[in-house]
């Protein structure tokens, strides 16, 4: 039998749902909301893609302070930060 409760209790699945919600917000240019969703996604799914998208949102908001704070909080090195900066 398919166990929906067990599936929804999966941190990975919940993280991926948050990631998808962040993508929906980002496509509406609601980058602040998107960044929060990606941050929650990363907390749950530990996916570097979720973290990258979170940082990209700060770049799209032109929030260099927020970008640097999040990058340092998650130990992103200079090369990683430059890669994200070049993506926007």
Image: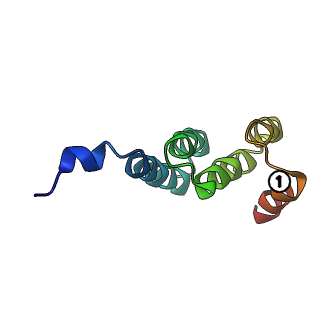
Q: Residue furthest front?
A: 1
Residue 17 in the figure: left or right of residue 46: left
- The residue that disc 1 covers is 81
Where the N terminus falls, by quadrant? bottom left
| Front one among 57 and 18 | 18
Image location of residue 60, percent across then percent down: 71, 51
Image location of residue 15, percent across then percent down: 45, 47
Q: Residue furthest left?
A: 1
Q: Residue at x 21, y 44 (%)?
A: 5
Relative vertical location of residue 85 with respect to residue 58 in this rendering, above or below: below
Label 1 crowd (10 A; few <14 / some 14-19 / many >=20): some
Image location of residue 52, percent across then percent down: 67, 54
Image location of residue 16, percent across then percent down: 44, 53
Label 1: element kind: helix
Relative vertical location of residue 17 with respect to residue 88 in this rendering, above or below: above
Q: How is the image coloured?
A: rainbow
Residue 70: quarter of image: top right
Where the C terminus falls, by quadrant? bottom right
């Amino acid at each position: 039998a398919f166990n929906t409760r067990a599936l929804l209790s999966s941190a990975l699945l919940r993280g991926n749902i948050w990631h998808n919600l962040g993508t929906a917000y980002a496509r509406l240019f609601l980058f602040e909301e998107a960044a929060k969703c990606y941050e929650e996604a990363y907390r749950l799914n530990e996916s570097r893609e979720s973290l990258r998208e979170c940082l990209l949102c700060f770049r799209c908001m032109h929030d260099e302070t927020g970008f640097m704070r999040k990058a340092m909080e998650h130990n992103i090195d200079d090369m990683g930060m430059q890669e994200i900066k070049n993506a926007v």
